[in-house]
């Protein structure tokens, strides 16, 4: 079955420290992977798509098919990065539906 | 303007009453989705639509029905609300597999 696992419910770091939010997936086909961010009581916003290999707000994520991972990284965390982060998997069928992980709350302390 | 709006933003209702949430898009996207967001569960798919009058169930569809009579509108109905349906409901639209979703602002529903 297709599944997305985010093992950390909460990640707390100090401002300026590196950040890595973990995401592992299980899917036998060719996955499309995304990271979404949700700031306090706001709508979810697309942060990254693995297919575009872009860097947004200093965040990057690399798809590792061998380890079935798509970890989100940032070298120097900022307080405004505090938010809920969701990893999501698509491509499982023609409906384009996304399967989400349970989310990781990132708290960046001053 | 994100091209997708949800109404109402907040609603409190009593157990056993029917409730309808509305999602409206201006992007002319074929695919629309309803998710619920609960702590520890992330987002779980309730129902989705792949065209006018074409809908299908997601992983947590029990107790919910949907309708899509126009491309721009996707309605979610709780036929008889229960306390377990207290949640934040998000609608989303998709422009295709590579693009991911655009989400609405959410509806916070409380069933008392």
Image (cartoon, coloured by chain):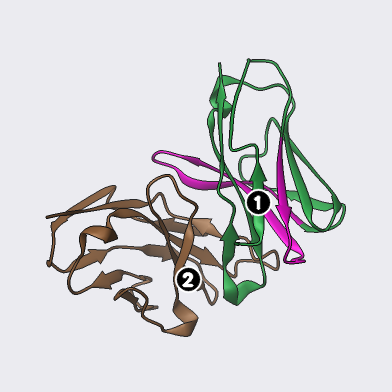
Chain colours: A brown, B green
Say what secondary structure mark 2 lies in: strand
- Position in image of residue A15 (x %, y %): 13, 62
Per the image, is A7 magenta?
Answer: no
Between the C-alphas of marks 2 and 1, the distance is: 25 Å
Q: Position of residue A106 (x, y in %)?
A: 26, 54
Label 2 environment density (alpha carbons within 10 Å; few <14, some 14–19, many ≥20): many
> Horizontal and vertical percent for residue A19?
20, 66
Instruction: Residue at 60%, 66% (x, y): give it.
Output: A92
How many numbered circles does the render carry?
2
Res. B16 in view:
yes
Kindly identify which chain the residue marked by label 2 belongs to: A
| B33 drawn magenta | yes
Q: Would you say A3 lies left or right of B92 here?
A: left
Q: Which residue corresponds to mark 2? A: A33
Quadrant of the rendered structure where residue B9 is?
top right
- Residue B92 percent across, percent down from the top left: 62, 56
**Segment colored magenta:** B21-49
Residue at image point 48% right, 61% down: A45
Disc 1, SS = strand
Q: State the mark number for residue B5.
A: 1
Residue drawn where x is 55% and y is 74% of the image = A29
Question: Could you classify mark 1 by the number of other residues whose Cα lies within 10 Å: few (under 14), some (14-19), or many (20 or more)?
Answer: many
- Mark 2 and mark 1 on one chain: no
Q: Is residue A1 visible?
A: no
Q: Quadrant of the N terminus of chain B?
A: bottom right
Q: Residue furthest front?
A: B1
Q: If the image is split into quadrants, where does the C terminus of chain B sit? A: top right
């Amino acid at each position: 079955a297709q599944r997305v696992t985010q093992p950390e419910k909460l990640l707390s770091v100090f401002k300026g420290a590196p950040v890595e939010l973990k995401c592992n997936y299980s899917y036998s086909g060719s996955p499309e992977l995304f990271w979404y961010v949700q700031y306090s009581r706001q709508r979810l916003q697309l942060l990254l798509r693995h297919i575009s290999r872009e860097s947004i707000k200093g965040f990057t994520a690399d798809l590792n098919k061998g380890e079935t991972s798509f970890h989100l990284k940032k070298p120097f965390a900022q307080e405004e990065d505090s938010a809920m982060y969701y990893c999501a998997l698509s491509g499982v069928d023609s409906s384009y539906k996304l399967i989400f992980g349970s989310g990781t709350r990132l708290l960046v302390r001053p | 303007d994100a091209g997708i709006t949800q109404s109402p933003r907040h609603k409190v209702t009593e157990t056993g009453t029917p409730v309808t949430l509305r999602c409206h898009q201006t992007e002319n996207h074929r695919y629309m989705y309803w998710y619920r967001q609960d702590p520890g569960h992330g987002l779980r798919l309730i129902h989705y639509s792949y065209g006018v009058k074409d809908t299908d169930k997601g992983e947590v569809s029990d107790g919910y029905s949907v309708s899509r009579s126009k491309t721009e509108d996707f309605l979610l109905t709780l036929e008889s609300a229960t306390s377990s349906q207290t949640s934040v409901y998000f609608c989303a639209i998709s422009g295709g597999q590579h693009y991911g979703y655009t989400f609405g602002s959410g509806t916070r529903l409380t069933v008392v």
